[in-house]
Image (spheres, helix red, strand yellow):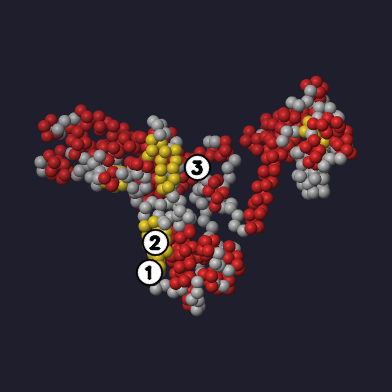
Amino acid sequence: MPAIVIDDPLGISCVFSDGSRASFSFAGTPCPGLVRDLLTGLVELIHPHGAVDKAGSVNHFTQAIRNMAKTLAAQGFTGRARHLRRAQLVEYWLGTSSPWEACTRRMLLAFHTLTGELGPKVSELAQGRAYNPQPYRRPLPPYSETEWARLSTACRRIVDEAFGQHRQALADAARGHDPDLHGWTQPNLRWLVARVGPVNADGFAQHLGYPTPRVRRLGGLYEATTALFPHMDVVIAYRLLFGVYSGIVPDGIDDLFVEDIDWAGDTTVLLRYVKGRTATESLTLPRRAVRLLEQWLSHSSLLRSFADGDIRRQLWLGLARPGHSTMFAGAPDRNVTLRWIVRHDVAGDDGKPLKLHRSRIRTTHQSMRDKNGWAGRNRATIDPNHSPQVEGDNYLSATTAAQRRAVEAIVEDAQHDLLRRAQPPVVISQADTVELVRDYPQLVGALRLDDEVITELVGGQRDVFVAACADQLSGLHGPKGAPCPARPWVCLLCPLAVFAPRHTVNLLRLKAFFTRQWQTMPAAQFMAVFGPYSQRIGQILDRFDPAVLATAAAHVTGRDNELPLRPEESTQ
């Protein structure tokens, strides 16, 4: 198992999704029975059972275990988790910190889910609200469009200039010769550097058999090495731009290996990466990210050929400094990245150096992507750093029975609404009771309509505006027993509505109203408010005889006073 409880000495051993390991010992900790039960719950929280997937995260839980065990032992407690009493937990959680309360609650709940050994009052308390709620942490907002443009432009400029110099250096090296025989020229020097690799002046002098001062005096080694091999400055630009184009989480970009790139054709890449808080994920890269990745692999291929086996596997490989021989792989230091921002004059909207948070790059990527698609314009999430699926799985999941029943009721209402919208409209071509009973027996049966109600529907006694309503007091769109408060267009999708030829004038007036609203409202807003109704009204009118529609159209003037509108709904 990825995480197991060890009894001698008492502790826990973990293997995480990235292959790293960690062990924590509780030898000498009081209340060993309680500690073991909490560790059993902790195992259920660690990947793949839960979301905990880093040694640092497990360490927070182990500190909470030690704190709880010592605190309860000082009060004379010596039992296991099943011996805990509600009053003991209330006293402990009221006196401890917010993180330790959160950790111990989660472990007790996981232990109870696995074993069911907690008492009913204790489990109910553990499921309730925290006494020390977690402080609200404001999520990082996306960068503004101007800041995003400055960062992207700076990175693009750096990588293009560096790659252009690299290609020129390779072309020079291809036509160069041994500088010891053909002269100390730039092409010849680059020819030799491409074969020797990134070495300093001492190593280069040793290879040629020259004194080091002579190599330095002749010069050109710094320029040749800088052009042929990517250095820290260029690698940072590539990494940031790759995040801009792909939207991968920062820790996933940091730990990429060359073998994580799965080419599925010439223009498609399936990239596997490890997200620290979850596990291994995969992403089909956007086209721009694929082209950038191709460029980087070409740019770093010469340097990679001189790297050792373990370093060679790292995707982000470069020289620690321009013109030097020391290689580095992986993520650069945060301070190095901040100095990069200052050096390349990437400013924020306040005129100061841009505060670079790579998590904000992912947030901004998603924000910009959502603005470019239809689905994104209607997207609303609690935290812009999360996708709708993540928020639905983690933040909108019900935790108590009452909450689950409420959520299920909302889902059922939504499903019923979808089913109602999918049903065809009830349209009778003639004011004929027999036609209604013959063609819509399911409506008559579902609404339990008697002969008197059917006659009133057909005869016009139950007319509203665009239809005849089978039951205005049904409570479908308002309080049950009170007249329906719905606007005229809501009847178009209502299962209680019956449309007859006498309604065609008002239907055409409503259609003209939709046309005027379309001309005055943004398309997205119109579709959100009137879209389903404007589509349904066309389906209804198509069911009537063209001669009936032509006669009715003569009574439509296309003005708001033809409809029962509120002042805010006026279009004129």
Residue drawn 78% across and 41% down?
446
Residue topped by disc 3: 366
Residue 128 lies left or right of residue 155; in this view the side is: right
Residue drawn 69% across and 36% down?
422
Residue topped by disc 2: 13
Q: How far apart are marks 3 and 1 (CA)?
A: 47 Å
Tell me if label 3 and label 1 are in contact, CB under 8 Å: no
SS at mark 1? loop
- The tally of labels here is 3
Tell me if label 3 and label 2 are in contact, CB under 8 Å: no
Residue drawn 50% across and 65% down?
104
Q: Is residue 204 visible?
A: yes
Task: Give the image quarter of residue 167.
Answer: top left
SS at mark 3? helix
SS at mark 2? strand
Q: Distance between the residues labelled 3 and 2?
A: 37 Å
**First in sequence: mark 3 vs mark 2:** 2
Q: Tell me residue 164's x, y (percent).
A: 31, 32
